[in-house]
Image (cartoon, coloured by chain):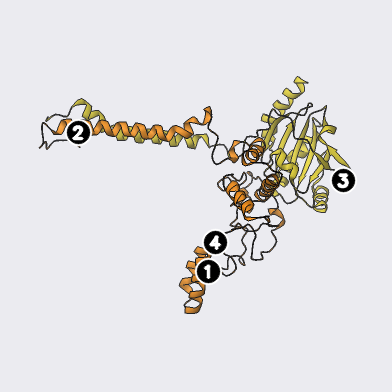
Amino acid sequence: MNTPTPRGNNSRWLPLAVFAALAVLLAAGVWLSRKPNREALPSPLIGKPAPAFSLPVLHEAGRLLSSDDLRGEPYLLNVWGSWCPACRDEHPVLTRFAETKRVRVIGFNWKDEHADALRWLEQFGNPYWVVVTDFEGKSAIDWGIYGAPETFLVDGKGIVRWKFVGPLTDATIRDELLPKLAEVEKAR
Amino acid sequence: MSFERKSKSPPAPLFQRGGQHGFVGADAVSRRIPVSPVTTLSTEDLSPLKKGGRGGFAVLAHSLRQIAGPLSLALLLTLALAAPLTAQPANDPVPLSFNDSGEERRFHALVAELRCVMCQNQSLADSNAQIAHDLRREVLDLMRQGKDDAQIKDFLVARYGEFVLYRPQVESKTWLLWFGPALVLLAGGFVVARIVRQRSAASTPAPNDDEQEW
C-alpha cells in the first residue's frame, strides 16, 4: 500500500468540502439578511379581516370611531406617537402622500398623552383624516403592533392588505404602497 | 422571583413609552437603543447596592477591585450571592401582582417561552420594551380569563405570527428545523463509521505503513 488509493485521495478533500459547504451556508445567511428592515415581522393579519376596534377620536372628546365606520372605502392606518422620533422623520413623507388624497389616512395614536399628541400635530401639521387614540395599548395588541411607526393598508371590505414596519419613505410608497393600493381599488 | 421592582427608579423618559422602529437617519442606531434594557438604567440604577439584577455582577466585580474595606467587601459578597435570586427586568411601570404562587409559576413558565417582538433576542419575560410590558399584562389577563397555555399562544400567534414562539410547532415547513440536527448527526455518524471501517481494513494487512496519509 505505498500508493494512496483513489478513495483515500477523495476523503482528503472531505474536510475542505464540508468547510466550503458551511461557508456557502454562511454566505447565504448574510445574503438573505441584507435588507435594512430584516427585523420587521411579517404580519399574520395580511389577507384577514382587520381587528374590530372602537377607539376615542383625538380631536373630539367623547366620540368613538369603530372599525365598522370605516367600511366601504380603503384606508391607511398609521401608528404614531409624539414620543417617537422616527415618526417625525416619517411625517413629511406621510404628509406628502396624504395631500394626494389617494386614500384616507387614519392616525393611530399609540400610548401617548392626549395633550402631547395634540401639540405634536399642531407643531408639525396634521396629515390625518382622523386620529384615534389607544392609550392602554390593548387594541394595538390586536393589530400586532409592536413599535411605531407602523402602517397598515385595509381595503373597503375591511381586509388587511399590506403592512409596513418602520418609517415610510417615498420609495416605499412608490414601490410598495401605490401598487398595492391600485390592486385594492381594482378589485373593488 | 417576581416582576415587582424593589428599588425605585426614575420614571422612563417619554420617548421610551413604546418601542419605536427607526431605520433611517445617521442616528438610527442610537434611536433604536431606547428599547434595550441597558440604556434604561440610569447611573443611579447602576449602583450595586440598589440594583440586584444580573447586570450587578459586572459592576460588583469592578467595585470589588476598588473598595478595599473588609466590611464593604463582606456586604458586597452578600449582595453578590443574593443577586441571582432577585434578577428582575427593570422598569416595569406598574408591577404585575399575582393571586397565588401557582399562578405566578405558570405565568413565568409561559412568558419564558414567548419571544419579545421588539427586541427579538429576548424572551417576553426578560424584555424591558414597553410592548413586552403590555404583552405580559395581556398574558396574565388571558390566564385569569381561564385560557389555557395553548390558547394564549394561539392568541399571540394570530396577532404577531409564529415568531413569538421559541418552540415552533412541528409542521411540514418546520421539519427541517426540528429534524435537521438529527439528520446532520446521522450523516456525521455515517462518515465516521466509513472512515473507521476503511482504516481498520487498511491497517491489518500493512501495520507499519510510513506513507499513510492519515
Q: Please name whichever residue, B38 or B199, is drawn nearer the observer in this view of the structure.
A: B199
User: Closer to the N terminus: mark 2 or mark 1?
Assistant: 1
The quarter of the image holding the C terminus of chain B is: top left
Q: Are marks 4 and 2 on the same chain?
A: yes
Three-letter amino acid code at disc 4?
A: Leu
Three-letter amino acid code at disc 1?
A: Leu
The residue wearing badge 1 is B79
In three-dimensional space, the C-alpha distance between marks 1 and 3, rounded to whole angstroms, equals 52 Å
User: Closer to the N terminus: mark 1 or mark 4?
Assistant: 1
Residue B165 seen in the current view: yes
In three-dimensional space, the C-alpha distance between marks 1 and 4, rounded to whole angstroms, equals 10 Å
Q: Residue furthest top?
A: A187
Closer to viewer: mark 4 or mark 3? 4
Q: Are marks 1 and 3 on the same chain?
A: no
Tint applied to chain B in the drawing:
orange
Q: Secondary structure at mark 4?
A: helix
Q: In the image, is B89 to the left or to the right of A114?
A: left
Residue A36 seen in the current view: no
The residue wearing badge 4 is B85
In three-dimensional space, the C-alpha distance between marks 4 and 3, rounded to whole angstroms, equals 48 Å
In three-dimensional space, the C-alpha distance between marks 2 and 1, rounded to whole angstroms, equals 58 Å
Three-letter amino acid code at disc 3?
A: His
Mark number displayed over residue A59: 3
Identify whether A125 is placed above or below A157. below
Q: Please name whichever residue, A176 or A141, is drawn nearer the observer in this view of the structure.
A: A141
Q: In the image, is B113 to the left or to the right of A20?
A: right
Q: Chain of mark 2?
A: B
Q: Chain of mark 1?
A: B
Q: Position of residue B204 (x, y in %)?
A: 13, 33
User: Closer to the N terminus: mark 4 or mark 2?
Assistant: 4
Total numbered badges shown on the rendered structure: 4
